[in-house]
């Protein structure tokens, strides 16, 4: 019955999508001639004035533009005109770097916090205060100290993705079942080997869950950060196209941001499944 | 007294109680066992049985006193003392073979893969799990999981096997077969074993000596019952043995009534010289541990069966 449920769900999804596109198309299409004017003047004014077309692009416009982008995703015509592939590449690279730095810091530190009640208590007030700070609030400070907008964006990604990983690692490590630790103790397993053979596999699902939350937040934040720092990246692209009043490109960028975010989440979800063990 | 392989000497375990005082789970506990002996501790929950076992395993430290194993005071855990946990405590991300191999590599770090594997396989075969090596614990039944736990404990060829109610979570049928396995293995290998149980029949079937503990807090080791049943006893006809009910009733009576009132009933109880109960055919004889003359003879707790020969 599951396959039939899947099929039915797919049919409903497609129907919803078609309905959405249909409503979108009808809402933005032209209503016919609304004002009579000379053809030359009409050409100057565009369809919005002559045919009553909405300023919001319709699905066909977006589709055509998307097709155009997909055909040459990596063109580079100077600072304000780069292919979407290049812009997304910059964003993914920034997220990747900041996220990697966060992993390098958060997982060992999380281990330490999880294993030592002293460190846990000592660091707790700092974490509690730093965690709720909006990552973008760090931006001026980062720009002032690092003096490089690209690195500042990476720092912002680092600071926003470090907390969920840190807290989940600490929690996962602290919550490893006592009996598994006792098994390692009765077998005289040393601290380092115990950390890698018992604590790490036992805490891995919790750690990966934290990493999955982090990548989601990092991808949310990169768009806002790039709007601020400018230059390159999908966030900058969105803001640049808004300044160009190209709503079509803005919609395409929104769509792509969603797709890449989903992809990143799915990759982490797959890793989480790999380390999850049934009990 | 013969050579003591395990000697628990005057250990105590105290926890800080409410109002600044200390609550002693037990105080001044002495217990000794010989090499190759199977000892069972019986007592109600909260009497500190598990604490005694954890101290013996090195997982817990006594507040006072010491434990000497094979002539050496123990300090922390050791590969000489294997523990079979009540909850089997298998690592769920490892296979059966992986779990046993983990113990083997912990003991012999320089062994190569093939050797570890072969050694682990021997013990998997010993507990009757041949064919299930590559299954994960989640795919095994409760009894099979505990078999893996036993294989893991045996694979490091420990001097002592410590078992904390290893079969209490299993159904009666599985429990029976596993008891048979443990008894067979212990007899074959001359393994010294120390086990905690709630099950009187289990204790009578497996143990050479049964240690009775009173209720906590301030629990004491009240009596040591020597098992009068022959070494070659079988589980199926255990209850037909003439001494069986005498032993069983003695232990049950202790658990039901005397474990509560033992401290007030026996003010002169000497924890270093715990009375040894030998259940003989005509009547129950309580002898002192000290090799002196028999001090007193006491009527068994259930007279009906304690003197079957005199009435006939």
Image: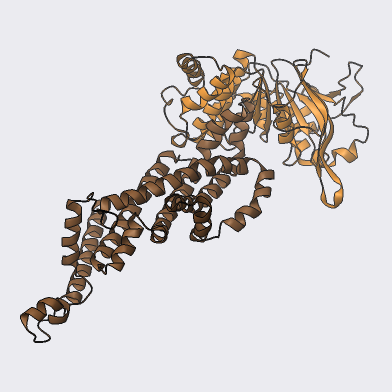
Chain colours: A brown, B orange
- Figure quadrant of the N terminus of chain B: top right
Q: Is residue B279 visible?
A: no
Let me know if residue B74 appears in the view: yes
Pick the residue in front: A154 or B288.
A154
Judging depth in this view, the residue of B218 and A218 nearest the camera is A218
Q: Which image quarter: residue A22? A: bottom left
Q: Identify which residue is drawn at 40% across, 39% down.
A: A274
Vertical placement of A78 versus A177: above or below? below
Measuring from the top left, give residue A114's x and y in whole percent.
Answer: 61, 43
* Residue A47: x %, y % from top left: 14, 76
Residue at 31% from the left image edge and 63% from the top image edge: A240
Residue B46, picture quadrant: top right
Q: Residue at x 26, y 68 (%)?
A: A247
Q: Position of residue B154 (x, y in %)?
A: 58, 20
Residue B11 placement: quadrant: top right
Q: Looking at the picture, how far across and down is residue B190, in whole percent?
A: 64, 14
Q: Quadrant of the C terminus of chain B?
A: top right
In the image, taking residue A52 as reference, residue B243 lies left or right, namely: right
Residue at (49%, 58%) from the top-left corner?
A: A139
- Closest to the observer, B85 or B92: B92
Position of residue B139 in the picture relative to residue A32 (left or right): right
Given residues B156 and A229, the one toward you in this image is A229
């Amino acid at each position: 019955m599951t396959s039939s449920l899947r099929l039915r769900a797919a049919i409903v999804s497609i129907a919803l999508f078609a309905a959405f596109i249909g409503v979108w198309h009808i809402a933005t299409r032209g209503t016919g001639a609304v004002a009579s004017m000379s053809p030359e003047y009409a050409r100057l004014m565009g369809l919005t004035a002559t045919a009553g077309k909405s300023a919001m692009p319709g699905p066909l416009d977006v589709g055509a533009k998307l097709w155009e982008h997909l055909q040459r995703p990596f063109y580079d015509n100077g600072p304000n005109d780069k292919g979407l592939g290049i812009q997304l590449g910059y964003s993914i690279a920034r997220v990747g770097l900041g996220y990697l730095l966060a992993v390098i810091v958060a997982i060992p530190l999380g281990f330490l916090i999880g294993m030592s009640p002293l460190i846990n208590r000592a660091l707790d007030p700092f974490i509690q205060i730093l965690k709720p700070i909006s990552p973008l609030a760090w931006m001026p400070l980062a720009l002032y100290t690092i003096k490089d907008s690209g690195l500042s964006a990476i720092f912002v990604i680092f600071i926003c993705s470090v907390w969920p990983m840190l807290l989940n690692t600490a929690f996962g490590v602290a919550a490893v079942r006592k009996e598994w630790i006792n098994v390692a103790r009765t077998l005289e397993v040393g601290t380092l080997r115990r950390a890698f053979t018992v604590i790490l596999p036992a805490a891995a699902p919790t750690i990966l869950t934290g990493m999955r939350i982090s990548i989601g937040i990092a991808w949310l934040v990169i768009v806002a950060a790039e709007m601020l720092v400018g230059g390159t990246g999908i966030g900058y692209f969105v803001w640049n196209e808004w300044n160009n009043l190209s709503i079509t490109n803005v919609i395409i960028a929104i769509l792509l941001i969603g797709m890449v975010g989903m992809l990143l989440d799915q990759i982490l979800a797959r890793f989480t499944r790999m380390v999850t063990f049934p009990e | 007294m013969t050579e003591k392989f395990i000697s628990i000497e005057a250990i105590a375990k105290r926890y800080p109680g409410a109002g600044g005082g200390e609550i002693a789970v037990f105080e001044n506990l002495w217990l000794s066992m010989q090499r190759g002996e199977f000892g069972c501790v019986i007592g109600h929950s909260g009497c500190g049985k598990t604490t005694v076992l954890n101290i013996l395993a090195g997982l817990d430290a006594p507040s006072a006193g010491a434990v000497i194993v094979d002539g050496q005071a123990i300090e922390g855990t050791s590969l000489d003392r294997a523990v079979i946990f009540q909850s089997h405590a298998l690592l769920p991300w490892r296979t059966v073979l992986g779990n046993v191999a983990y113990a083997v590599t912990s003991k012999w770090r320089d062994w190569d893969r093939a050797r570890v594997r072969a050694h682990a396989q021997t013990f998997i075969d010993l507990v009757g799990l041949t064919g299930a090596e590559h299954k994960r614990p989640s795919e095994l039944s409760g009894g099979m999981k505990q078999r893996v736990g036993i294989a893991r404990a045996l694979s490091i060829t420990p001097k002592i096997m410590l078992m904390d109610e290893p079969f209490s979570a299993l159904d009666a049928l599985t429990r029976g077969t596993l008891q048979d396995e443990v008894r067979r293995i212990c007899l074959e290998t001359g393994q010294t074993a120390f086990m905690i149980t709630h099950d009187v029949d289990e204790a009578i079937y497996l143990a050479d000596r049964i240690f009775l503990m009173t209720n906590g807090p301030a629990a004491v080791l009240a009596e040591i019952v020597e098992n009068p049943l022959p070494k070659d006893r079988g589980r199926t006809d255990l209850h037909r043995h003439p001494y069986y009910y005498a032993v069983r009733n003695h232990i049950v009576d202790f658990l039901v009534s005397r474990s509560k009132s033992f401290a007030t009933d026996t003010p002169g109880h000497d924890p270093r010289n715990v009375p040894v109960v030998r259940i003989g055919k005509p009547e129950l004889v309580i002898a002192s541990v000290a090799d002196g003359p028999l001090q007193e003879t006491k009527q068994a707790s259930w007279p009906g069966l304690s003197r079957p020969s005199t009435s006939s």
